[in-house]
Image (cartoon, rainbow, N blue to C red):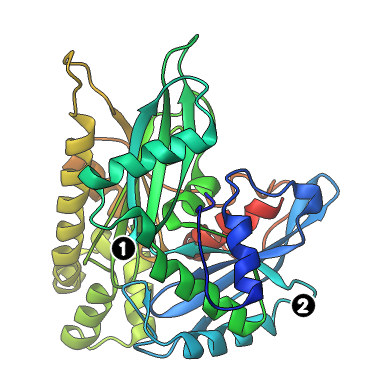
Amino acid sequence: MLLSRVSSKIGEDAAALSRTLSRWFPMPTLLMPPAAGIDISDASVKWLTLERAGTSMRIGTYGEVPIPEGVVVSGIIKDTKALSETLREVRKHLGHVHAAHAALPEEGAYVFSMVVPHATPREQILRMVEFEFEGRIPIPPSAAVYDYSPIFARSGAEPEEVSVIVFPKDIAEAYVEAFNGAGITLLSLEVEARSIARAVSTGAPDEPVTLVVDFGRARTGFSVLKRGVPIFTSTVEVGGDAITRTLTEKMHMSPEEAAHFKNEQGLNASKENAPAMEAILGTASALADEVTRHYHYWDTRRNDKGERMTPVGKVVLVGGNANLAGLTDYIAGRVQASVERGDPWRHVIDFDEYIPPIERKIALQYATAIGLALRSL
């Protein structure tokens, strides 16, 4: 999703980006330069580029560099110059690629769906979005960047449903400034959930409503996808680092041993490793509680006619800590629903033709970057 109406005050390059962001429909692929997908978290920057190889795709470059502590906190940039320095390090690895698509943090996003009359012009829809601010968004339109994405049009001339994403303008401008300072041309900004959806959603018209769970190091992001488009996002302070700390401190494992234990045994550990499994269970249970809460809220919502509005068909796990052994079965048992790990290569690679240099367990950490990189192809 491209965010509209970014009025930047940080130079001509940022002003040019502002004009780009004011267009909902992305630049035609034939006109778009090669671009990296760049995913910025509190702890690191991940990047990935894709290249065409005939009718298929290949991984160009990818990697991860750490961000000094305190530079980005809960997705908010606290030191723009320091982040630019990190992005300059990333730029060294991009080769001939000098542009990027990036994601804004879900912590600062306001995401909701609304219904608009059939065939309503874009500018009128944006005015309707502004009207919704008073009841939904605790900031005025003048302090925000926002845009919408069509979900689907109902039959005939019936109203259409759209997904709206709003960000505080100062958060978006800080990201623009950081990329500008690094000499990387920023082509678009969108919410992380939209990037992940582009990577793991089937894109099929009959795809069920999906609850995506991005189980990260320090936090977990939740998003509800309707036909592959986010209609809700939230973040909770539950992350896999808590498991690693417990295993290193109480079980005296090294970080490498803890990571191996999580991914290979985890919640399936034998009785001999029961103390280690108990160390994992606390975080796994907290995560399952949050998944259950989000799932049942959205699955049981009803309209004025008593009809279910968003019956959730499945739960999809992404993020590096989604590799915790036994996690899918554990959450499925708690939620009583289908739970699976996402496939970030779904729209990228045919494994009969090409084996990527990133194994699937690691690829779950790159779901956002992959989804961003797909924008240029």
| Nearest to N terminus: mark 1 or mark 2 | 2
Residue found at the far top of this picture: 156
Which is in the foreground here, disc 1 or disc 2? 1
Task: Please give the residue where the numbered disc 1 appears in the rendered image.
Answer: 107
Q: Residues within 10 Å of mark 2 (few under 14, many from 20)?
A: few
Depth check: give the residue in front, 216 or 158: 158
In the picture provided, is 178 more to the left or to the right than 319?
Answer: right
Count of numbered circles in the view = 2
Q: Amino acid at mark 2?
A: Gly
Relative image position of residue 34 (x, y in whole percent): 75, 62
Relative image position of residue 231 (x, y in whole percent): 36, 40
Residues tagged 1 and 2 counted as in contact (Cβ below 8 A): no
Depth check: give the residue in front, 210 or 134: 134
Relative image position of residue 346 (x, y in whole percent): 59, 45
Relative image position of residue 276 (x, y in whole percent): 19, 73
Give the residue displayed 42% in from the left and 52% down from the top. Answer: 193
Q: Quadrant of residue 249?
A: bottom left
Q: Is residue 228 visible?
A: no
The Cα atoms of the two marked residues, 1 and 2, are separated by 32 Å
Task: Please give the residue where the numbered disc 2 appears in the rendered image.
Answer: 95
Residue found at the far right of this picture: 54
Q: Secondary structure at mark 1?
A: helix
In the picture provided, is 31 more to the left or to the right than 190?
Answer: right
Give the residue displayed 41% in from the left and 39% down from the top. Answer: 127
Q: Secondary structure at mark 2?
A: loop
Q: Amino acid at mark 1?
A: Glu
In the picture provided, is 302 more to the left or to the right than 153?
Answer: left
Q: Residues within 10 Å of mark 1 (few under 14, many from 20)?
A: some
Judge whether 65 appears above or below 128 on screen. below
Q: Is residue 141 visible?
A: yes
Give the residue displayed 74% in from the left and 46% down from the top. Answer: 28
